Amino acid sequence: MSSAATPGTPLPVRTPGSPARGRHRRPERPEIPEGAPALLLAVPSADSAEARFVADEIVSIVRGEQPGIDVTAAYLATAEGSEGSGVSELLAKAAAAGLPAPVVVPLLPGPHQDALAALHGAAAETGAVVTDALGPHPLLAEAVHVRLSEAGLARADRARLFTINTAADGVVLAVAGGEEAAQAAGITGVLLAARLAVPVVAAALDVPGSVQAAAAHLRETGVSRPALAPFVVGPEVDAELVASVAEEADCPAAAPLGAYPAIGRLVVSAYLSALGVSQGQPDRPVPAF
């Protein structure tokens, strides 16, 4: 098994690992071609301790899902003292070392045009492939549901007929990336509404008044306890913005998606799709909550 790159060093080329053996081994993972490019997990934020924590956790999940992948996290912007961790820097170093152009997977649950445009611009000079955002996908609706349940704002399992006094009867699905991103979140909103059996309205965290308007709309339709569900991984927005928007809309808020395990699985899936690698069995079915 190969080792991962560290900031300041070129991205390595994937080397094949050893297949698992034994009666009780896990199902075989997709075969990745020898010499396949590295996976560059593009974090749409500046390099910071908070962003690194989330990115490192997701990198660990990716390695657990597919140990043969060489994966490194990089950032759209770098802070003072963190040179060598930017997307453009790592792509340039890989090119200078004669390595295959990495596959760039944005750490975004949905379209964020500013961040994606910046990534495509950085990748254009080296020919690196930039995949689409990770969603919409049922696993992301599951992740939002779990974060709401952790905050006491939704039942964890609809089959368990107990009452949660703080459960929301409507949800504002708050995204980053403007009104276009909010419109694209409609599919995830439908999936989430089906899971929770409550109305869900998408809104943009970074558009003034968008979340408040969505919460007001829910109240006008009879919702008495709307909740805010941040449909963001975390690094792409300021945590203080989420808190202030939730306060202005008078809604309790769940946590961002963070390093939810399914996000790592979706990152792997995006990488394999970019390589044209057959992924065999589809994603595990999402349980009905």
Image: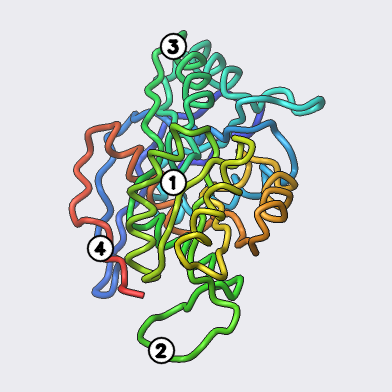
Residue ID for mark 2: 160
Q: Nearer the viewer, mark 3 or mark 4?
A: 3
The image shows residue 224, relative to residue 15, as above or below, that is below
Residue ID for mark 1: 1
> Quick check: 223 left or right of 247?
left
Q: CA distance from mark 1 to mark 2?
A: 43 Å
Q: Point out the tag, 2 or 3, that comes first from the N-terminus.
A: 3
State the SS at label 1. Answer: loop
Q: Amino acid at mark 1?
A: Met
Q: Is the residue marked by circle 2 packed among few (<14), some (14-19), or many (20+) residues within 10 Å? A: few
Q: Point out the tag, 1 or 3, that comes first from the N-terminus.
A: 1
Q: Point out the tag, 2 or 4, that comes first from the N-terminus.
A: 4
Picture quarter containing residue 216? bottom right
Determine the residue located farthest toward the top in the rendered image: 125
Q: Nearer the viewer, mark 1 or mark 2?
A: 2
- Can residue 147 be seen by looking at this rendering? yes
Q: CA distance from mark 1 to mark 3?
A: 30 Å
